[in-house]
Amino acid sequence: MSEMSKRSTVYFEPDVHRALKLKAANADQSISEVVNDAVRLALREDAEDLSAFDERVAEPTLSYEALLKDLGAHGKL
């Protein structure tokens, strides 16, 4: 743990805590390291999703009703 680390209290459901302890032990890591890795991964995925939305912002949209009509017109529904 680095000097820059911040302490936070997080409450886990008993089953989740047990799974975290097992995963940490199997990976020879602390629970903090496992949780930090998981949070980093989730944040990275969120950033990728937001980037994809930004890249596609100019694309035309299609309503659900229009999609159903198009699928029906092409015999796919």
Image: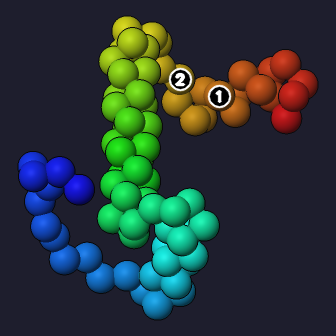
Residue 63: % across, % down: 52, 30
Q: Classify residue 56 by image quadrant.
A: top left
Q: Quadrant of the C terminus?
A: top right
Q: Earlier in the sequence, mark 1 or mark 2?
A: 2
- What's the residue at 39%, 12% (across, down)? 55
Secondary structure type for disc 2: loop
Residue at x 10% of width, y 52% of height: 3
Task: Report how many numbered discs are placed on residues in the image.
Answer: 2
Q: Nearer the viewer, residue 65 or 42?
A: 42
Q: Amino acid at mark 2?
A: Leu
Residue tagged 2: 62
Q: Residue at x 87, y 28 (%)?
A: 76
Whether pointer 1 and pointer 2 mark residues with C-beta atoms closer than 8 Å, the reply is: yes
* Residue 9 horizontal side relative to residue 73, left or right: left
Of helix, strand and loop, which one carries label 1?
helix
Query: In the image, which disc is placed on residue 67?
Result: 1
Give x and y (percent) for residue 14: 46, 90
Q: If the image is split into quadrants, where does the N terminus sit?
A: bottom left
Q: Evaluate whether residue 53 shows in this view.
A: no
Label 1 amino acid?
Answer: Leu
* Residue 6: percent from left, percent from top: 11, 59
Indicate left or right for 56 with 54 as reference.
Answer: right
Is residue 31 visible in the rendered image? The answer is: yes
Of the numbered discs in the image, which one, if any, rests on residue 75?
none
Q: Please tell me how crowded label 2 is: few (under 14), some (14-19), or many (20+) other residues with Cα within 10 Å.
A: few
Query: Farthest residue in the top direction?
Result: 58
Residue that appears at 39% across and 69% down: 31
Residue extending farthest to the bottom is: 14
Q: Nearer the viewer, residue 60 or 22?
A: 22
